[in-house]
Amino acid sequence: MLLPAGPDTGRKHLRKGNEMKRTPTLLAVGAALVLPVAASAQSPADIAYCKKLAMLWYTYVDTDPSASVATALNTCHSASAAAIPVLEKALKDGGFTLPKKM
């Protein structure tokens, strides 16, 4: 039995199958790359408020911060949404009145 000859013989079907399998993988990889960037976008108001909280801590608290507070103090500029609740709790627990959010 002779098989048809040529460079595309049987490859179109295989190529299409590979493309179908590759599409969900590429979408998953793309989402994994884009979602953290979108989630890390911080509003200028959050960053300013977080810096205000950090300034309160540095100005009035004499003790060394716990690991979670130290992390929050160091990440106000990049992850203020996560840092704000930690700093607010630490300051409230220390008897401070929090500044108003902008």
Image: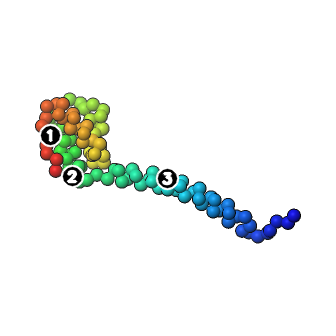
Residue 21 in the image, given as x and y percentages of width and height: 59, 56
Q: Gap between marks 3 and 2, in whole Å?
A: 32 Å
- Mark before the other along the chain sequence, 2 or 1: 2
- Residue kind at label 2, given as amino acid type: Ala
- Residue kind at label 3, given as amino acid type: Ala
**Mark 3 sits on what residue?**
28
Q: Gap between marks 3 and 1, in whole Å?
A: 41 Å
| The label number, if any, that marks residue 98 in the structure image | 1
Residue 16 in the image, given as x and y percentages of width and height: 63, 62
Q: Quadrant of residue 62?
A: top left
- Mark before the other along the chain sequence, 3 or 2: 3
**Mark 2 sits on what residue?**
45
**Mark 3 secondary-structure assignment:** helix
Residue 81 in the image, given as x and y percentages of width and height: 28, 45
Foreground of the two, 88 or 52: 88
Q: Gap between marks 2 and 1, in whole Å?
A: 15 Å
Residue pictured at 18% horizontal, 30% vertical: 93
Is residue 81 placed above or below 27 in the rendered structure? above
**Mark 1 secondary-structure assignment:** loop
- Mark before the other along the chain sequence, 3 or 1: 3
Q: Pointer 3 and pointer 1: residues touching (CB < 8 Å)?
A: no
- Residue kind at label 1, given as amino acid type: Leu
Q: Pointer 3 and pointer 2: residues touching (CB < 8 Å)?
A: no
Residue pictured at 47% horizontal, 55% vertical: 30
